[in-house]
């Protein structure tokens, strides 16, 4: 599986298509494949970018 986090930067708004009920999230940090995101309905989550493809939300 490829790491899909290379385009993500802190401050970007994203959604997790596998957990739509988490709502909109803001990327806090990206360290290798690990992306920390603060979601409006799920709080801070550490996502493995090799397993979950976060989708940018440009509003």
Image: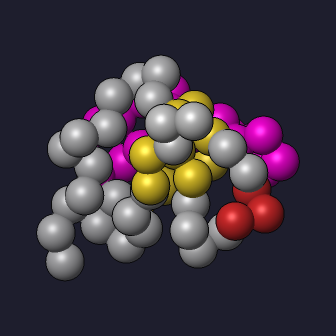
- Residue that lies at the very extreme toward the top in this rendered image: 11
Q: Is residue 29 magenta?
A: yes
Query: Quadrant of the rendered structure where residue 38 is?
Result: top right
Vertical side of 22 occupied by 32: above or below: above
Q: Is residue 46 visible?
A: no
Pick whichever, 49 or 19, lies toward us. Answer: 19
On screen, residue 24 versus residue 53, left or right, reads: right
- At a point 83% along the width and 48% down the height, the residue shown is 41
Q: Residue 36, how many percent across, how many down?
A: 50, 39
State whether residue 21 is above or below residue 13. Answer: below
| Magenta region, residue range | 27-44
Give percent across and percent down for residue 1: 19, 77
Residue furthest front as drawn: 59
* In the foreground, 58 or 50: 58
Can residue 1 be seen in the rendering of this structure?
yes
Q: Is residue 43 left or right of residue 2?
A: right
**Which residue shows up at 19% across the image and 44% down it?**
6
Residue sitting at 56 percent across and 68 percent down? Answer: 17
User: Magenta segment, principal secondary structure?
Assistant: strand
The structure residue drawn at horizontal position 67% and vertical position 44%, both measured from the top left corner, is: 24
């Amino acid at each position: 599986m490829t790491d899909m986090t290379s385009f993500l930067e802190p401050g970007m708004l994203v959604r997790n298509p596998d957990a739509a009920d988490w709502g909109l999230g803001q990327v806090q940090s990206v360290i290798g494949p690990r992306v920390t995101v603060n979601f409006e309905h799920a709080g801070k989550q550490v996502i493995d970018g090799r397993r979950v493809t976060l989708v940018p939300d440009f509003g």
